[in-house]
Image (cartoon, rainbow, N blue to C red):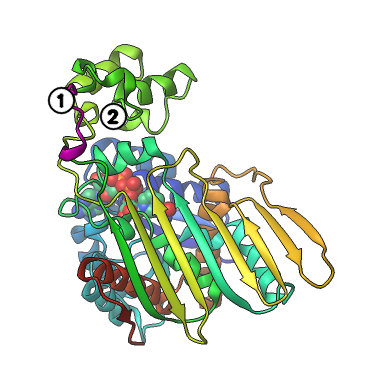
Amino acid sequence: MKQVRLIIVGAGNRGTVYASYAKEHPERVKIVGVAEPRDFYRERMIKEHDIPEVSVFTDWKDLAKEEKFADAVIIATRDHMHREPAIKFAKKGYHILLEKPMALDEKGCKDIIKAVTGKKIIFAVGHVLRYTRYTKKLKEILDSGRIGDVISLQRLEPVGYWHQAHSFVRGNWRNEKESSFMLLTKSCHDLDWIRHIMGKKCKTVSSFGSLTHFNKENKPANAGDNCLECAYEPLCPYSARKIYLSFLKRGNTGWPVNVITSELTKGGIIRAIREGPYGRCVYDCDNDVVDHQVVNMEFEGGETASFTMTAFTKARQRETRIFGTKGEIYGNGTKIQIYEFLTGKSEIVDTSAKDPSSLADHGGGDYGLIHSFIEAVAENDPSKVLSGPEETLESHLMTFAAEKARKEGKVIELKH
Ligand SMILES: NC(=O)c1ccc[n+]([C@@H]2O[C@H](COP(=O)([O-])OP(=O)(O)OC[C@H]3O[C@@H](n4cnc5c(N)ncnc54)[C@H](O)[C@@H]3O)[C@@H](O)[C@H]2O)c1
């Protein structure tokens, strides 16, 4: 396999995760350039990958002005900053791995697809769930015909009560104007995954959901504005003090604690709760994204799928039931339980074995995606990519249509 020369645009969390593949497989990839405005993250990338100064930029726009000097680029900027760089780097002939979501609206997604189509470039989107050991095994079982034809599917995305409070009530994804709608920021992975598993185009969608609980009407009379000054706090499961200090108690100072403060002590956490956005009353924030939503889908051939996203769960592991003409499957992201109608045979397939790789997160999906992308570029073989332009556009269009269906109370037909 030839060594791929790769540029990282946006050396934050995701950019750094993907770049670490180059450290594990230096024979396959060399990071030869970076664009990142934040000094710490840029310097760290330069140091870890020995990037020459001429190939270091603080803004992707300056990097894009240069003559093409690498094979591929990873675009891992925040959601609103995907469309422009994707189009620009496609025009320059770079192979592209673009983080999800592709863009924040239908037009943005279509513009990107237009820019990458017809060029001899590999294009992949960060739908890591397609690349997990679990999904690959599940797809293999379905393709073997063991449960016959898939007629319907049911998927649950349990966000988790404290995760909802952290990210979607107090945190970065709480407000549509500041980020985007919940189905796009959190669940576009799921609609894409359902499309992948059904192996067919979606014809029609409907959706219901709202922000029912985390609003001012539900604020208890004796609640304060901050968890540290609140008479209701002992009875509140969403208390910031309870959430963040319980992580510290268990010795966990990674996510989500490191999101609220860089001072990873009891004092640091209390200060962040008192002074920052993460101590605000969950019933009195500027959040407007839904806390529960359902989407119903009909596929070509009449098969159906239903999806539920809800904040109100203990678990955070997605669950799926798949109903076939010859059997049934239950899966929870690691275990796949198969039941065959004819033989009455049950089997549990366990896909939870840990990878030795440092990119083992997302059930091996992060590793699977970057590995497939690099292989596709090195061998000039787009078929290695499971999240290419056509199906990714399709699943984004399903997501936008479902949100429109929810907002307008309509059943929406997708035009392919
Ligand atoms: N595939 C997944 O499972 C998954 C998981 C988490 C996040 N994401 C997506 O990945 C993307 C990045 O998320 P993140 O958590 O890494 O965010 P992040 O904020 O950690 O990283 C984004 C980086 O882009 C940099 N940036 C800003 N302006 C720039 C510019 N002009 N030129 C170059 N870089 C610039 C920022 O400084 C930051 O370091 C988002 O779109 C997010 O939705 C995907």
**Compared with residue 410, is residue 66 higher up or lower down, i.e. above or below?**
above
Q: Quadrant of residue 214?
A: top left
Most distant residue in the right direction: 343
- Amino acid carrying label 2: it is Ile
Q: State whether residue 137 appears in this view.
A: no
| Residue 14 point in image, percent of width and height | 39, 49
Q: Main secondary structure of the magenta part?
A: loop
Q: Looking at the image, is mark 2 or mark 1 earlier in the sequence?
A: 1
Residue depth check, mark 2 versus mark 1: number of the one nearer the observer: 1
Quarter of the image with the N terminus is bottom right
- Which stretch appears magenta? 216-223
Judging by the rendered image, the residue that carries numbered circle 1 is 225
Q: State whether residue 14 appears in this view.
A: yes
Q: Is residue 209 left or right of residue 359?
A: left
Q: Is residue 410 left or right of residue 333?
A: left
* 30 vs 95, nearest the viewer: 95
Residue at 33% x, 59% y: name it. Answer: 183
Q: Is residue 234 left or right of residue 328?
A: left
**Residues under numbered marks 2 and 1 in contact, where contact means CB atoms less than 8 Å apart:** no
Q: Quadrant of residue 117?
A: bottom left
Q: Is mark 1 within 8 Å of ligand 1?
A: no
Judging by the rendered image, the residue that carries numbered circle 2 is 260
Residue at 79% x, 59% y: name it. Answer: 346
Most distant residue in the front direction: 221
| Residue 290 point in image, percent of width and height | 27, 52
Classify 10 Å Cα crowding around label 1: few (below 14), some (14-19), many (20 and above).
Answer: some
**Compared with residue 67, is residue 413 higher up or lower down, i.e. above or below?**
below
- Amino acid carrying label 1: it is Asp
Most distant residue in the top direction: 267
